Amino acid sequence: MEPLIEREVELATLNAYHADAAGGGGSVVLVTGAAGTGKTTLLQAFTEQVARAGGLVLTAAGVRAESTLPMGLLTELFAALPASAAGRFAGLLDQAAAVPGPVSSRTMRGVWEALRELSDETPVLVAIDDIQHADAASLQVLLSIVRRVRGARALVVLAETEYSHRASPLFRAELLREPACRHIHLARLSPDGVGRLAGPGLDSATTTELAELSGGNPLLAHALLSDHGRVRREADQHTPGLVVGDAYGQAVLSCVHRFEPVMLTVVSGLAVLGEPATPGTLARMLEVDAADAAWALQGLQEIGLVDAGRFRHQAAAAAVLDSMTGAERARWHRRIARVLHDDGEPAAVVARHLIAASHVAEEWALAELREAAEQADLGDDVDFAVQCLELAMTAARTEPERAAITMRLLRVQWRVNPATAARHLEPLTENLLEGLLPPGDASVILRALCWHGNLAAVERVLGVAAASEACFDPEVLARLRIAQQWLRVFCPSLLASTPAVPAAEVSPIFSQLVQAATALAEGLTRDPDADTVTVAEQMLQGGRLDDDSFDWIEAAMLTLVHADRADRAALWCGPLFEQAAARGAATWQARLAAVQGEIALHQGDLAAAERWAHAALTLIPARGWGVAIGGPLATLILAATESGRFEQAARQLRRATPPTMFQTRYGLLYLHARAQYHLATGRLHDALVDFLNCGEQMEQSGQQPTGAAPWRIGAATVYLRMGEDDLARQLVGELMHQPSTASSRAAARRLLEAAGDLPQRPGTLWASAQLAPPAARIPAQRQDGSAGWVRPQQALLHHTGTVLTGPDTPLPESDENADPPPDGSGDGTVLLSDAERRVAELVAVGHTNREVAQALFITVSTVEQHLTRVYRKLNLNGRSDLSVRFRLDPPEPS
């Protein structure tokens, strides 16, 4: 039996009453207390003591399911008597049960006389638990016994659960009026009592938490201890804090199932409400009397389930909700939502109940959902905003209303996963073309269509928006101009086939952003000058991330990178990434991670570039990247290529990409990265095809994205490797007469030097041409629009027999250690991979491992690994042998 804690006084009192009864001072004791407070435990301890002392004990317990069975409780009470005595009681009870209506006085008198005769022989203890569930006939007989018990050697102990369903509400009142009746009330345990119950196994903090969550209710405390002990056993370790699990939920339901109807109503409503509530609020929500609501709340607090109008633990509310049917929960949620709406509660509070009820039948409910979605969007609670909008969609009554809700869904979901938002693009595009959406929404739809590569729809949308009369609205005009500048960067080829936005004044609110967007677009499609760099810095200093500014904040950082100010871009990108993470904007995080990758690549930190690019592709799925996937893929390919891990680069190149990607700036980045991979692995013809494709696309678009070094540098490098020095000089000469970054000019000068001194041109000179940072090796196009590069391209194709193919040329399988084409030297260096050759040539002329690592943007460890393979393949003893093998002179002082 469980130990009695803080019930010792009550047990002593019962023993005293029994001693009085043994001397002829019979009485009745009513033991009351809330569910779970230990009435049954006290009753069991007392009856066992009396039985051990030789007293006659008769016990029974009321059962709700048997509360309509006449004489059911008394039949159980006397069933344990010896056959002779039991038969006498059974005859009386059966006779009474067979007659409908009240029990006759003859029957009641006969039962008492039989009980008194038993007490004459030995004191009798009648102990009945859960008397609230007794049948009416048994209660009548018990009341007759109570009225006669004084002076007899009998003690009657009745245990009743407070706030529980009663078969006869008048029984308790009649009982307490009797002079022989005594009353014992069991309170909840004190914190010290809970500590004694827990034992020495819990620390003080967990014991305090146990007292708070259980409310001092022994039943709930035992359940919490059971959950906590089970988890600790399963985990085989001490779990910090108190664990709440299934046992606690079952204990809660054990209490709840004993409640009276009004208590059940209040506890159910409180669980559905999920917030603290006053009796008045509950009364209106649940349509019960205010006094009954107050009584019910008081009862829940007495039990230990509720404190200050709310459940002590969410698990209690969850257990109550799980015990209800779905229809019951929905009915409560609808009722509560209406009351909260009428009371003017915040839209978010009302909307949560509407969502739980899946109910939007009234106009006010639709309005509450849309307002709640807008507030959630502003607060970056994307999941809740989506829930509100999706439910609102089911109740939209008109097509414009439905289109507006869908537009909001696109905006909200785009911030988390563009792949999910893409399902709204087709209907929204049609809505815009049909005039169901305002032209101001065109800018958002345009960017989304471009991102997912639906370039044909972009032309239609921009054409309709630009031709609309609403386009002359200053705000609409501003948004369209900003979108057009974004198109200029994202997919410049579209501008030639789309109508121009009317020339009119834009909204003053957007005028600065229009000017900044124009300047940044110029900087990203030409070589950024000092003024553009200033605009980029101002953009980064001014703005908080939002749907309107993000594209240009990203563009500002890329402008700094392209202007050889990657260190400045890095200072801004980190805090912005943290801001996006704090706001749960996975799409912003992914795009900023891709920018971080470009920054790291430009700075020569290949490992960081690879980490950031992988992070970008992890934050949102590949399908969500659309055509922009070419950006992080290009970073991964270049980082792996530059560090000599060609199989990893090839693995990225084998990933599927959207066909329309190659019509965007991301396709150019990807083509350049693929060309560098081909060049590094000795596939010179493939490299040349990709470099020239970059140039051709830029020539056609009339743009020069300076995302990295011009395509001419790459193509000229290939020509040098092929021995086509004249073609290399022609390309580099054209580049030297155009505006470009310092790193691009440095690379061009090295190439001219390599092409001009043929007798002294080993692979080292080609390697030195790569000393410009990786950011100087992404394709660019001439500003003057000349087509001089076509002639060397055609000459080389004629000379080599190469067929110029498109950007989606299948990628051959690669081998990290694949041998480059022989140079005809016959000295065995043909055994080296391209990466190994570059390292060997630089070391051979006297560069240290660290200098080589910095020059080639690889780690010192990678240099050492390449050298080890070079020594093994060429059977060399060390650095001194390299100079002999490569027949190189030491580098001249710079």
Image: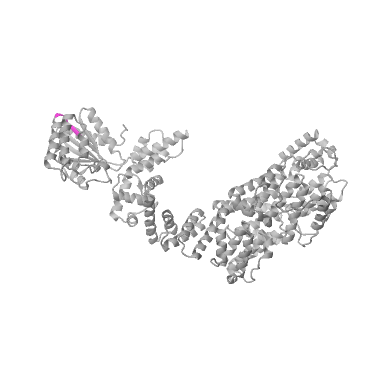
- The residue closer to the viewer here, 768 or 671, is 671
- The residue closer to the viewer here, 432 or 372, is 432
Q: Which residue lies furthest to the left in this view?
A: 106
Q: Is residue 126 visible?
A: no
Colour convention of the picture? one colour
- 805 magenta-colored: no
User: Could you tell whether 141 is left or right of 466 in the image?
Assistant: left
Percent across and percent down for residue 257 are 32, 44
As drawn, 756 above or below 232: below
Percent across and percent down for residue 548 are 58, 61
As drawn, 503 above or below 134: below
Percent across and percent down for residue 215 are 35, 43
As drawn, 125 above or below 614: above
User: Could you tell whether 807 is left or right of 617 in the image?
Assistant: right
- The residue closer to the viewer here, 5 or 757, is 757
In the picture, residue 52 is in which quadrant? top left
Image quadrant for the N terminus?
top left
- The residue closer to the viewer here, 742 or 704, is 704
Identify which residue is drawn at 27% across, 46% down. 165
User: Could you tell whether 856 is left or right of 627 in the image?
Assistant: right
Identify which residue is drawn at 68% across, 65% down. 497
Q: Is residue 474 visible?
A: yes
Q: Which residue lies furthest to the right in this view?
A: 759
Q: How many marks?
A: 0
Identify which residue is drawn at 57% across, 62% down. 429
Q: In this picture, which residue range is highlighted in magenta?
A: 121-125
Percent across and percent down for residue 376 are 49, 57
